[in-house]
Amino acid sequence: MLSLLLLLPLLWEGSLSQTLQMQRSVTVQEAMCVQVPCTFESSELQDYAPRPVYGYWFREGVPFKNGHLVATNDPYRWAQEKDWGRFSLLGDPRLLNCSLSITDPKLSDTGEYFFRLERGQLKFSFIMYPLYVNVTDLTQKPDIYVPEKLESGKEVTLNCSVPWVCENNKIRFSWMGDALPSQKIVPRSSPYSEVSFTPGHQHHGSNLTCQLTFIGHQLRIERTVQLNVSYPVQNVTISIAQDNNTTAFFPTGNSSLVVVKEGESLHLLCAANSNPPATLSWILRNQTLVSSQPSDNGVLYLELPHMGPADGGEYTCLAQHPLGSKEVSLSLSVQYAPRMLSPSCFWAEERLNCTCSVQAEPAPSVRWWIGEWIDHNNNSDNFRVLSIKSGPWINSSLIMKMDRVPSITISCEGMNTQGKQTLLFQLVPDRTNLSHVFQRGIIIGVLCGAGISTLLILCLLLLIKMLRKKSMTATPAASRGEAEDPKRSFWAGQSLDPISPAVDPIPNPAAPDDGPEELHYVNLNFQSVKAREDHGSTDPLTEYSEIKFQ
């Protein structure tokens, strides 16, 4: 506040000295209000009889009588209509007070103003140092109070206030926003307004605006806030990236199935919609593979490079949130060609039992071949095929009734959409053990020829002795004195040697042309003697193994 002592001449009948104290300028924002204190002293007023004293505030540069009068206490003078209620003389000139009030100013009100005093014939104006009023743009905005915590589904009340507004201002509040059922207009004379509503998860991040309108002035100001609504997990999505292609899943209830081939890689992404972001976890077979951090903003990645059979299963993305959690699952099926495991074959009670186990995804089927395909649904007394399936496994057995071990090739073939694999059981009797036949024939001949001459008997006995000596060096069973079972089949005790390059193998059975195939050879030895060395095969896809049967 600047104090100015002004000595102003009377502009009527000579020159009188007056004293006026008032700040030289004032700045006010448009539509706001300001009061300017003003006092004056005049010794000349004490010389006159009591009469009404009138004060006038004029815009400078206009005639006194017909000028732009903005405020007065003279009941016979009126300010211009556009200034009614905006400018007023607060002070009482009889008490030497000339204070001015400005309410709801406009930019066009910027300029200089001066005070004039009249009492009867005494009339004078203070024009040397007028009051300069500077009206600027309105920069004030409403204040919106938002509770610290907005929760989905719970009603909340917001307050909008304008404490700086003038008491005489006529104002109107308007509320706008997606969270409100409709625009709310509240005419109020008080400098604040309230609005109540129930936010939902869809209102998180939406705007809410409080707008203030000065009635008659058509001036609007507003403030906008963004709602921060806490809400539980709404939905969880899983995206899969493979070979530059991305697929998004929105599982609901049952898990979705994704099929990949062995050796392929996947990039999984789980995203959950909640506020604040949920904690995400990838889980496989009740084991947590990876978890998110708060900074991950509700997104969690999982890399699955070069997938194998052990990587298949149900992958669950669990989104945990204080207001409500949710999870979704994705089933990954890693498909691979059949694999032959644990082949076996044994001879017992004139039955040949061969078994092979096959693992594959999708679940494989098994076919047996003995020169031709054996129909599993056409079992007989001579052969049976038994197969048991469990997940990616199938165990199949071929049971054949035969009184001797022939020279034969049996094939076990596993197949699925990814390919097939064949396991060959090659049975080849050992030709070196034919001495058992001769030995048994000679013994029978001796028993039947008891009536022949003594000389012939002695010769035969000598021949038998020589044959027995040779047989002891040929078979361990004979050297241990094991008794021969007269009911045993002729081929039951024969050994089956592995195939060597020098032996022409029996042609393999024809296989269907529906995918890549691998052959595995199993050489069987039914004797307790050690089989001869396996010379192998030149086929790079052939594997040889030796199975001994005691």
Image: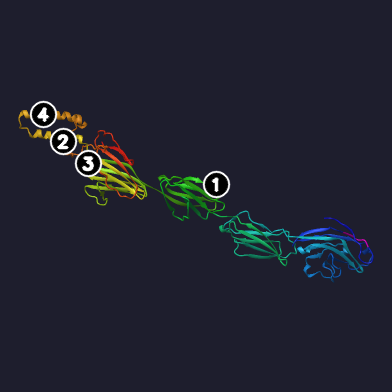
Q: Amino acid at mark 3?
A: Ser
Between the residue at mark 1 and the residue at mark 3, the CA separation in whole angstroms equals 68 Å
Between the residue at mark 3 and the residue at mark 2, the CA separation in whole angstroms equals 18 Å
Q: Amino acid at mark 2?
A: Val
The spot of residue 522 in percent (x, y) is 29, 40
The spot of residue 302 in percent (x, y) is 49, 47
As drawn, is 15 to the left or to the right of 364? Answer: right
Which callout, 1 or 2, points to the residue nearer the camera? 2
Which callout, 4 or 1, points to the residue nearer the camera? 4
Between the residue at mark 1 and the residue at mark 2, the CA separation in whole angstroms equals 82 Å
Q: Which of the pair 127/174 is nearer the observer?
A: 127
Instruction: Give me the disc on residue 437.
Output: 2
As drawn, is 446 to the left or to the right of 271? Answer: left
Q: Which residue is mark 4?
A: 461
Q: Earlier in the sequence, mark 3 or mark 4?
A: 3
Which callout, 1 or 3, points to the residue nearer the camera? 3
Instruction: Give me the disc on residue 466.
Output: none
Q: Which residue is mark 3?
A: 407
Q: Which residues are magenta?
A: 16-20
Q: Which residue is mark 1?
A: 293
Give neighbour class at mark 3: few <14, some 14-19, many 20+ (Cα, 10 Å): few
Give neighbour class at mark 2: few <14, some 14-19, many 20+ (Cα, 10 Å): few
365 up-or-down from 452: above or below? below
